[in-house]
Amino acid sequence: MEEFRAFIRILTVASLALAAVQIYLTLNKLWSRKHEKVVAESISIFGELLGLVPLAFLTLSFILDGQWEGVVDGVLWLGAGAVTIGIGAGMWVEGRRGRGFWRLLRDAMALERTEVGDLARSFFRPSGADEILRLLARIALIDEHLDDRERSFIASFADAWGIELSWDELAQQGEQDGVRTIELRDAVADYLSTSPPTAQVEQLGDVIVALVHADEEVSSNEDLMLAELSGMFDAYVSGSPERPRFEVALVPQSEEQDAAIRAVLPGVVKENVAGGSAYVVGRYFSERYAETVREQYQALNVFTTVLKS
Protein backbone atom coordinates (compact mmCIF):
# COMPACT_ATOMS: atom_id res chain seq x y z
CA MET A 1 0.00 0.00 0.00
CA GLU A 2 2.85 2.36 0.82
CA GLU A 3 4.41 1.67 -2.55
CA PHE A 4 1.13 2.53 -4.26
CA ARG A 5 0.91 5.81 -2.34
CA ALA A 6 4.51 6.64 -3.27
CA PHE A 7 3.64 5.96 -6.92
CA ILE A 8 0.63 8.28 -6.70
CA ARG A 9 2.82 11.02 -5.20
CA ILE A 10 5.22 10.70 -8.11
CA LEU A 11 2.35 10.99 -10.56
CA THR A 12 1.02 14.02 -8.65
CA VAL A 13 4.35 15.84 -8.88
CA ALA A 14 4.58 14.91 -12.56
CA SER A 15 1.09 16.31 -13.14
CA LEU A 16 2.17 19.60 -11.56
CA ALA A 17 5.08 19.76 -13.98
CA LEU A 18 2.74 19.06 -16.90
CA ALA A 19 0.37 21.78 -15.67
CA ALA A 20 3.25 24.25 -15.55
CA VAL A 21 4.25 23.33 -19.12
CA GLN A 22 0.63 23.69 -20.28
CA ILE A 23 0.34 27.12 -18.69
CA TYR A 24 3.65 28.22 -20.21
CA LEU A 25 2.65 27.12 -23.73
CA THR A 26 -0.75 28.79 -23.44
CA LEU A 27 0.52 32.07 -22.02
CA ASN A 28 3.53 32.20 -24.33
CA LYS A 29 1.25 32.34 -27.36
CA LEU A 30 -0.93 35.03 -25.76
CA TRP A 31 2.01 37.03 -24.41
CA SER A 32 3.65 37.37 -27.82
CA ARG A 33 0.41 38.97 -29.09
CA LYS A 34 -0.58 40.89 -25.95
CA HIS A 35 -0.31 44.25 -27.73
CA GLU A 36 -2.90 43.34 -30.40
CA LYS A 37 -6.40 44.68 -29.86
CA VAL A 38 -8.10 41.73 -31.54
CA VAL A 39 -6.32 39.28 -29.24
CA ALA A 40 -7.37 41.22 -26.15
CA GLU A 41 -11.00 41.37 -27.30
CA SER A 42 -11.05 37.62 -28.01
CA ILE A 43 -10.55 36.83 -24.30
CA SER A 44 -13.68 36.45 -22.19
CA ILE A 45 -13.15 38.36 -18.95
CA PHE A 46 -16.39 36.97 -17.50
CA GLY A 47 -15.31 33.44 -18.36
CA GLU A 48 -11.91 33.88 -16.72
CA LEU A 49 -13.42 35.40 -13.57
CA LEU A 50 -15.98 32.61 -13.29
CA GLY A 51 -13.17 30.10 -13.43
CA LEU A 52 -11.00 31.90 -10.87
CA VAL A 53 -13.66 32.19 -8.14
CA PRO A 54 -14.13 28.44 -7.47
CA LEU A 55 -10.41 27.88 -8.04
CA ALA A 56 -9.58 30.43 -5.34
CA PHE A 57 -11.86 28.66 -2.83
CA LEU A 58 -10.38 25.27 -3.72
CA THR A 59 -6.86 26.60 -3.26
CA LEU A 60 -7.83 28.06 0.11
CA SER A 61 -9.26 24.68 1.12
CA PHE A 62 -6.02 22.96 0.12
CA ILE A 63 -4.06 25.47 2.24
CA LEU A 64 -6.22 24.75 5.29
CA ASP A 65 -5.88 20.98 4.77
CA GLY A 66 -2.12 21.19 4.22
CA GLN A 67 -2.29 19.65 0.72
CA TRP A 68 0.65 21.41 -0.86
CA GLU A 69 0.23 19.76 -4.28
CA GLY A 70 -3.26 21.24 -4.63
CA VAL A 71 -1.98 24.60 -3.38
CA VAL A 72 0.79 24.69 -6.02
CA ASP A 73 -1.61 23.69 -8.80
CA GLY A 74 -4.16 26.30 -7.70
CA VAL A 75 -1.55 29.06 -7.47
CA LEU A 76 -0.25 28.21 -10.95
CA TRP A 77 -3.69 28.47 -12.53
CA LEU A 78 -4.64 31.56 -10.51
CA GLY A 79 -1.51 33.27 -11.79
CA ALA A 80 -2.26 32.21 -15.36
CA GLY A 81 -5.80 33.53 -15.00
CA ALA A 82 -4.57 36.86 -13.69
CA VAL A 83 -2.19 37.27 -16.64
CA THR A 84 -4.94 36.32 -19.11
CA ILE A 85 -7.32 38.85 -17.57
CA GLY A 86 -4.63 41.53 -17.84
CA ILE A 87 -4.18 40.75 -21.54
CA GLY A 88 -7.95 40.61 -22.07
CA ALA A 89 -8.35 44.00 -20.40
CA GLY A 90 -5.91 45.45 -22.94
CA MET A 91 -3.15 46.53 -20.56
CA TRP A 92 -0.53 46.25 -23.32
CA VAL A 93 -2.64 47.41 -26.26
CA GLU A 94 -1.32 50.58 -27.86
CA GLY A 95 -3.47 53.57 -27.00
CA ARG A 96 -4.74 52.02 -23.75
CA ARG A 97 -1.55 51.85 -21.71
CA GLY A 98 -2.17 55.16 -20.01
CA ARG A 99 -5.48 54.04 -18.51
CA GLY A 100 -5.83 52.42 -15.12
CA PHE A 101 -6.33 48.64 -14.83
CA TRP A 102 -9.82 48.92 -13.33
CA ARG A 103 -10.98 51.22 -16.10
CA LEU A 104 -9.60 48.83 -18.71
CA LEU A 105 -11.31 45.92 -16.99
CA ARG A 106 -14.62 47.77 -16.84
CA ASP A 107 -14.42 48.72 -20.53
CA ALA A 108 -13.58 45.16 -21.56
CA MET A 109 -16.48 43.73 -19.55
CA ALA A 110 -18.86 46.33 -20.97
CA LEU A 111 -17.85 45.30 -24.49
CA GLU A 112 -18.30 41.63 -23.69
CA ARG A 113 -21.86 42.15 -22.53
CA THR A 114 -22.74 42.76 -26.17
CA GLU A 115 -23.31 39.14 -27.07
CA VAL A 116 -23.02 37.87 -30.60
CA GLY A 117 -26.74 37.15 -30.76
CA ASP A 118 -27.52 40.72 -29.76
CA LEU A 119 -25.33 42.23 -32.46
CA ALA A 120 -27.77 41.48 -35.26
CA ARG A 121 -30.66 42.95 -33.26
CA SER A 122 -28.83 46.07 -32.09
CA PHE A 123 -27.09 46.79 -35.38
CA PHE A 124 -30.08 48.37 -37.15
CA ARG A 125 -30.16 48.22 -40.93
CA PRO A 126 -27.61 50.82 -42.01
CA SER A 127 -27.27 52.68 -45.24
CA GLY A 128 -25.34 50.48 -47.63
CA ALA A 129 -26.48 47.30 -45.84
CA ASP A 130 -25.92 45.27 -49.02
CA GLU A 131 -22.31 46.42 -49.20
CA ILE A 132 -21.75 45.61 -45.53
CA LEU A 133 -23.08 42.08 -46.06
CA ARG A 134 -20.72 41.63 -49.01
CA LEU A 135 -17.84 42.83 -46.82
CA LEU A 136 -18.74 40.31 -44.13
CA ALA A 137 -18.95 37.53 -46.70
CA ARG A 138 -15.54 38.41 -48.14
CA ILE A 139 -14.02 38.45 -44.67
CA ALA A 140 -15.52 35.01 -43.98
CA LEU A 141 -14.03 33.78 -47.27
CA ILE A 142 -10.57 35.25 -46.65
CA ASP A 143 -9.38 31.81 -45.49
CA GLU A 144 -10.99 30.27 -48.62
CA HIS A 145 -13.48 28.35 -46.49
CA LEU A 146 -17.00 29.29 -45.43
CA ASP A 147 -17.81 27.57 -42.15
CA ASP A 148 -21.47 26.83 -41.39
CA ARG A 149 -21.21 28.97 -38.25
CA GLU A 150 -19.89 31.90 -40.28
CA ARG A 151 -22.70 31.42 -42.80
CA SER A 152 -25.31 31.40 -40.00
CA PHE A 153 -23.76 34.48 -38.40
CA ILE A 154 -23.95 36.50 -41.63
CA ALA A 155 -27.43 35.15 -42.38
CA SER A 156 -28.67 36.50 -39.04
CA PHE A 157 -27.90 40.03 -40.26
CA ALA A 158 -29.41 39.42 -43.68
CA ASP A 159 -32.61 38.15 -42.06
CA ALA A 160 -32.73 41.07 -39.62
CA TRP A 161 -32.31 43.53 -42.49
CA GLY A 162 -34.69 41.74 -44.88
CA ILE A 163 -31.98 41.07 -47.48
CA GLU A 164 -31.76 37.83 -49.46
CA LEU A 165 -28.21 36.58 -49.92
CA SER A 166 -26.94 34.63 -52.91
CA TRP A 167 -24.20 32.46 -51.42
CA ASP A 168 -23.23 31.08 -54.84
CA GLU A 169 -22.71 34.60 -56.14
CA LEU A 170 -20.65 35.57 -53.09
CA ALA A 171 -18.52 32.44 -53.42
CA GLN A 172 -17.92 33.16 -57.12
CA GLN A 173 -16.89 36.70 -56.28
CA GLY A 174 -14.40 35.32 -53.77
CA GLU A 175 -12.97 32.97 -56.41
CA GLN A 176 -12.72 35.75 -58.99
CA ASP A 177 -10.65 38.09 -56.86
CA GLY A 178 -8.94 35.31 -54.90
CA VAL A 179 -10.29 36.98 -51.74
CA ARG A 180 -7.04 38.92 -51.78
CA THR A 181 -6.29 41.06 -48.79
CA ILE A 182 -5.60 44.20 -50.84
CA GLU A 183 -8.99 44.09 -52.57
CA LEU A 184 -10.73 43.53 -49.24
CA ARG A 185 -8.95 46.48 -47.64
CA ASP A 186 -9.83 48.67 -50.61
CA ALA A 187 -13.49 47.64 -50.23
CA VAL A 188 -13.44 48.67 -46.56
CA ALA A 189 -11.74 51.96 -47.49
CA ASP A 190 -14.48 52.61 -50.07
CA TYR A 191 -17.11 51.96 -47.38
CA LEU A 192 -15.45 54.42 -44.98
CA SER A 193 -15.22 57.01 -47.77
CA THR A 194 -19.04 57.18 -47.78
CA SER A 195 -18.81 58.81 -44.31
CA PRO A 196 -20.95 56.31 -42.36
CA PRO A 197 -21.91 57.24 -38.75
CA THR A 198 -19.13 56.51 -36.26
CA ALA A 199 -21.48 54.38 -34.16
CA GLN A 200 -22.13 52.20 -37.20
CA VAL A 201 -18.40 51.81 -37.83
CA GLU A 202 -17.82 50.85 -34.19
CA GLN A 203 -20.55 48.24 -34.41
CA LEU A 204 -19.17 46.91 -37.68
CA GLY A 205 -15.76 46.49 -36.03
CA ASP A 206 -17.33 44.44 -33.22
CA VAL A 207 -19.30 42.38 -35.76
CA ILE A 208 -16.16 41.57 -37.77
CA VAL A 209 -14.30 40.45 -34.63
CA ALA A 210 -17.23 38.20 -33.69
CA LEU A 211 -17.45 36.82 -37.25
CA VAL A 212 -13.78 35.90 -37.38
CA HIS A 213 -14.14 34.00 -34.10
CA ALA A 214 -17.45 32.38 -35.06
CA ASP A 215 -15.77 29.16 -36.23
CA GLU A 216 -13.49 29.16 -33.15
CA GLU A 217 -10.42 29.29 -35.38
CA VAL A 218 -8.56 32.38 -36.57
CA SER A 219 -6.51 31.81 -39.72
CA SER A 220 -3.34 33.77 -40.49
CA ASN A 221 -5.17 35.75 -43.20
CA GLU A 222 -8.03 36.58 -40.83
CA ASP A 223 -5.58 37.67 -38.13
CA LEU A 224 -3.74 39.80 -40.71
CA MET A 225 -6.93 41.52 -41.86
CA LEU A 226 -8.20 42.11 -38.31
CA ALA A 227 -5.03 43.97 -37.39
CA GLU A 228 -5.30 46.30 -40.41
CA LEU A 229 -9.06 46.82 -40.34
CA SER A 230 -9.02 47.57 -36.60
CA GLY A 231 -6.53 50.36 -37.27
CA MET A 232 -8.72 51.76 -40.04
CA PHE A 233 -11.86 51.68 -37.89
CA ASP A 234 -10.12 53.20 -34.84
CA ALA A 235 -8.70 56.04 -36.97
CA TYR A 236 -12.14 56.76 -38.45
CA VAL A 237 -13.98 56.66 -35.11
CA SER A 238 -11.41 58.90 -33.41
CA GLY A 239 -12.65 61.90 -35.43
CA SER A 240 -9.10 63.03 -36.17
CA PRO A 241 -7.83 60.18 -38.33
CA GLU A 242 -4.41 58.97 -37.32
CA ARG A 243 -1.89 58.78 -40.15
CA PRO A 244 -1.00 55.17 -41.01
CA ARG A 245 2.38 54.34 -39.52
CA PHE A 246 3.80 52.02 -42.18
CA GLU A 247 4.58 52.91 -45.80
CA VAL A 248 5.38 50.51 -48.62
CA ALA A 249 7.97 52.20 -50.83
CA LEU A 250 9.52 51.23 -54.17
CA VAL A 251 13.11 52.45 -54.40
CA PRO A 252 14.44 52.45 -58.00
CA GLN A 253 18.12 51.60 -58.33
CA SER A 254 18.52 52.97 -61.85
CA GLU A 255 16.89 55.30 -64.36
CA GLU A 256 15.51 52.25 -66.18
CA GLN A 257 13.75 51.03 -63.01
CA ASP A 258 12.48 54.56 -62.37
CA ALA A 259 10.92 54.70 -65.82
CA ALA A 260 9.47 51.19 -65.43
CA ILE A 261 7.74 52.14 -62.15
CA ARG A 262 6.21 55.25 -63.72
CA ALA A 263 4.95 53.15 -66.62
CA VAL A 264 3.41 50.41 -64.46
CA LEU A 265 2.09 52.75 -61.73
CA PRO A 266 1.30 56.05 -63.52
CA GLY A 267 -0.63 57.49 -60.55
CA VAL A 268 2.24 57.11 -58.06
CA VAL A 269 4.45 60.13 -57.37
CA LYS A 270 8.02 60.02 -56.10
CA GLU A 271 8.32 61.37 -52.55
CA ASN A 272 11.14 62.31 -50.22
CA VAL A 273 11.63 59.62 -47.59
CA ALA A 274 14.25 58.80 -45.01
CA GLY A 275 17.53 58.27 -46.86
CA GLY A 276 16.41 59.56 -50.26
CA SER A 277 13.39 59.40 -52.53
CA ALA A 278 10.99 56.59 -53.37
CA TYR A 279 7.56 55.80 -54.74
CA VAL A 280 5.19 55.28 -51.80
CA VAL A 281 2.57 52.84 -53.08
CA GLY A 282 0.57 52.45 -49.87
CA ARG A 283 0.22 53.49 -46.24
CA TYR A 284 -1.04 51.02 -43.65
CA PHE A 285 -1.77 50.66 -39.93
CA SER A 286 -0.38 47.15 -39.48
CA GLU A 287 3.27 46.35 -40.10
CA ARG A 288 2.43 42.73 -40.92
CA TYR A 289 -0.10 43.89 -43.51
CA ALA A 290 2.43 46.30 -45.00
CA GLU A 291 4.95 43.45 -45.27
CA THR A 292 2.35 41.39 -47.15
CA VAL A 293 1.84 44.23 -49.63
CA ARG A 294 5.61 44.66 -49.98
CA GLU A 295 5.97 41.00 -50.93
CA GLN A 296 3.41 41.41 -53.72
CA TYR A 297 5.24 44.42 -55.18
CA GLN A 298 8.53 42.50 -55.21
CA ALA A 299 7.28 40.88 -58.41
CA LEU A 300 8.35 44.12 -60.16
CA ASN A 301 11.99 43.21 -59.39
CA VAL A 302 12.47 46.58 -57.73
CA PHE A 303 13.87 47.11 -54.24
CA THR A 304 10.80 47.38 -52.00
CA THR A 305 10.80 48.25 -48.31
CA VAL A 306 8.49 49.11 -45.44
CA LEU A 307 9.13 52.49 -43.82
CA LYS A 308 7.86 53.42 -40.37
CA SER A 309 6.55 56.97 -40.45
Image (spheres, rainbow, N blue to C red):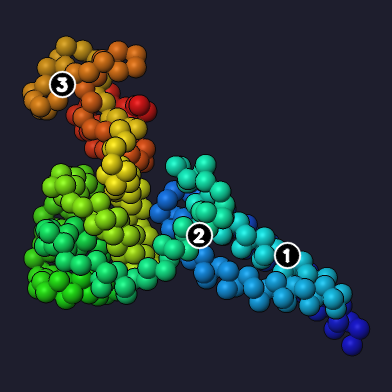
Q: CA distance from mark 2 to mark 1?
A: 25 Å
Image spot of residue 187 (x, y percent): 16, 49
Which residue extends farthest right? Answer: 2
Q: Earlier in the sequence, mark 1 or mark 3?
A: 1
Q: Secondary structure at mark 3?
A: loop
In terms of image quadrants, where is residue 222?
Answer: bottom left
Quarter of the picture containing the C terminus is top left
Disc 2 crowd, CA 10 A, few/some/many (<14, 14-19, 20+): few
Total label count? 3
In the rendered structure, which amino acid carries the disc numbered 1? Val
Q: Is residue 299 left or right of residue 76?
A: left
Q: Dots 1 and 3: beta carbons under 8 Å?
A: no
Residue position for label 3: 269
Q: Nearer the viewer, residue 186 or 2?
A: 186
Q: Is residue 175 above or below residue 163?
A: above
Image spot of residue 193 (x, y percent): 15, 44
Disc 1 crowd, CA 10 A, few/some/many (<14, 14-19, 20+): some
Q: Nearer the viewer, residue 253 or 79?
A: 79
Q: Earlier in the sequence, mark 2 or mark 3?
A: 2
Residue position for label 1: 75
Residue position for label 2: 106
Quarter of the picture containing the N terminus is bottom right
In the rendered structure, which amino acid carries the disc numbered 2? Arg
Image spot of residue 92 (x, y percent): 52, 46
Tell me which residue sits at (14%, 25%) in the image.
268
Q: Secondary structure at mark 1?
A: helix
In the rendered structure, which amino acid carries the disc numbered 3? Val
